[in-house]
């Protein structure tokens, strides 16, 4: 193959090497002014962030809002704090981002006003799209109860629960994100589910 | 109470997702057979796990996410409220400086008043504790317990949300 026959390569990020750049390399590139680095990080993590915040949103647009908030808040901290931090630990940015996402969702739900005075037609519940009004109301009522029960968990329990149930991460990965042992993550999860059962009671035991 | 009793919901969650090895599945069944307390809890825990799962991400959710073009970079977006953050932090910093500046005079009226530079530096330390940031940024640096299952289950929300870094600044 001659030089002219080689396929043209797409423009590369500043710090791209032969391997896929780590999150931490992309954060450094972003802080150095590489705009493509931000996009690469968003592309890499936005599905997981969406999974973590969508429980607290009523509509797809609101879910997207919370994803956007999570990235902007994570990067606001990155610009302020990361230059002074050691980013040699792989996974540090991802762990930080996911914890921000869990808290963005939780804090969004804390404002009870966002859950009132909405007509049934305003609800956009994927699972209930084909259901009748009664079923949709019941589905939304259950979602509210679960959100309220989650709000009563400790921060660590809520983080473990969100990463496991909403993020669908294996417990080993949950543990890495939170900087705890896998056994510790499982114990927190067990107590979270027990506490949810106490609060949800008959609502879930049919 | 054995270790498996403290991980029962996690084991059910793994079995539900097909993540449990056949060996671990047999161990779980054996544990249930020999532990009346866990047998009693099993149905309730599994009902909760089934009830709290969300439906799969919908096409509408993905389309809304793609249309937002988040990856194009930070820019002021009125509806997100994200750009309120710096203003809130600045207001908090100003309040803290004022508070710290006033305190020495009220507590020690007969003594010397701390120089303004010292007071401001103290306020800065309170607002931006390096250790606190480190612990929030890198969870592995937090002082959680070891692998003995004796974790702190009390509400530790203050350690993150009370820091004011992100937790309570939502509009």
Image: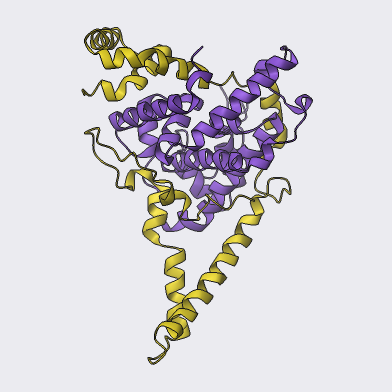
Q: Position of residue B158 (x, y in %)?
A: 43, 51
The colour style of the image is by chain
Question: In the drawing, does residue B5 fall left or right of residue B129?
Answer: left
Name the quadrant of the N terminus of chain B: top left
> Furthest residue to the front?
A202
Question: In the drawing, does residue B25 fall left or right of residue B105?
Answer: left
Residue A113 vertical placement versus A202 (above, below)? below
User: What residue is shown at x 36% (from left), y 34% (from top)?
Assistant: A176
Viewer-proximal residue among B137 and A145: A145
User: Who's purple, chain-wise?
Assistant: A
Give the colour chain B carries in the figure.
Answer: yellow
Viewer-proximal residue among B42 and A159: B42
User: What residue is shown at x 64% (from left), y 20% (from top)?
Assistant: A139
Q: Position of residue A98 (x, y in %)?
A: 49, 38
User: What residue is shown at x 50% (from left), y 46% (from top)?
Assistant: A27
Residue B25, quarter of the rendered image: top left
């Amino acid at each position: 193959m001659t030089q002219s026959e080689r396929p043209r390569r797409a423009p590369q990020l500043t710090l791209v090497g032969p391997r896929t750049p780590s999150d931490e390399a992309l954060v450094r590139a972003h802080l150095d002014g590489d705009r493509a680095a931000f996009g690469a990080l968003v592309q890499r993590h936005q599905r997981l962030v969406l999974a973590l915040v969508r429980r607290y949103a009523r509509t797809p647009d609101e879910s997207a809002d919370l994803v956007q908030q999570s990235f902007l808040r994570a990067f606001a901290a990155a610009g302020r704090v990361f230059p002074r931090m050691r980013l040699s630990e792989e996974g540090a940015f991802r762990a930080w981002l996911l914890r921000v996402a869990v808290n963005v969702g939780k804090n969004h739900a804390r404002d009870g006003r966002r859950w009132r005075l909405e007509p049934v037609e305003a609800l956009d519940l994927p699972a209930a799209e084909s259901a009748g009004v009664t079923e949709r109301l019941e589905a939304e009522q259950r979602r509210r109860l679960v959100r309220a029960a989650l709000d009563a968990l400790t921060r660590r329990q809520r983080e473990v629960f969100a990463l496991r149930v909403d993020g669908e991460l294996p417990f080993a990965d949950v543990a890495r994100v939170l900087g705890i042992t896998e056994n510790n993550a499982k114990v927190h999860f067990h107590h979270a589910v027990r506490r949810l059962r106490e609060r949800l009671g008959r609502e879930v035991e049919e | 109470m054995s270790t498996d009793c403290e991980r029962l919901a996690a084991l059910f969650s793994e079995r539900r997702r097909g993540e449990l090895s056949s060996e671990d599945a047999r161990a779980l069944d054996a544990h249930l057979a020999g532990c009346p307390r866990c047998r009693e809890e099993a149905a309730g825990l599994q009902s909760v796990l089934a009830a709290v799962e969300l439906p799969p991400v919908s096409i509408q959710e993905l389309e809304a996410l793609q249309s937002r073009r988040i990856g194009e970079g930070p820019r002021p977006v009125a509806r997100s409220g994200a750009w309120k953050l710096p203003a809130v932090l600045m207001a908090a910093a100003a309040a803290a400086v004022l508070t710290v500046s006033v305190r020495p005079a009220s507590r020690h009226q007969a003594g010397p008043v701390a120089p303004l530079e010292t007071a401001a530096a103290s306020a800065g330390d309170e607002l931006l504790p390096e250790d606190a940031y480190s612990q929030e940024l890198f969870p592995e640096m937090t002082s959680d317990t070891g692998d003995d299952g004796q974790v702190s289950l009390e509400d530790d929300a203050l350690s993150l949300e009370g820091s004011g870094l992100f937790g309570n600044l939502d509009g």
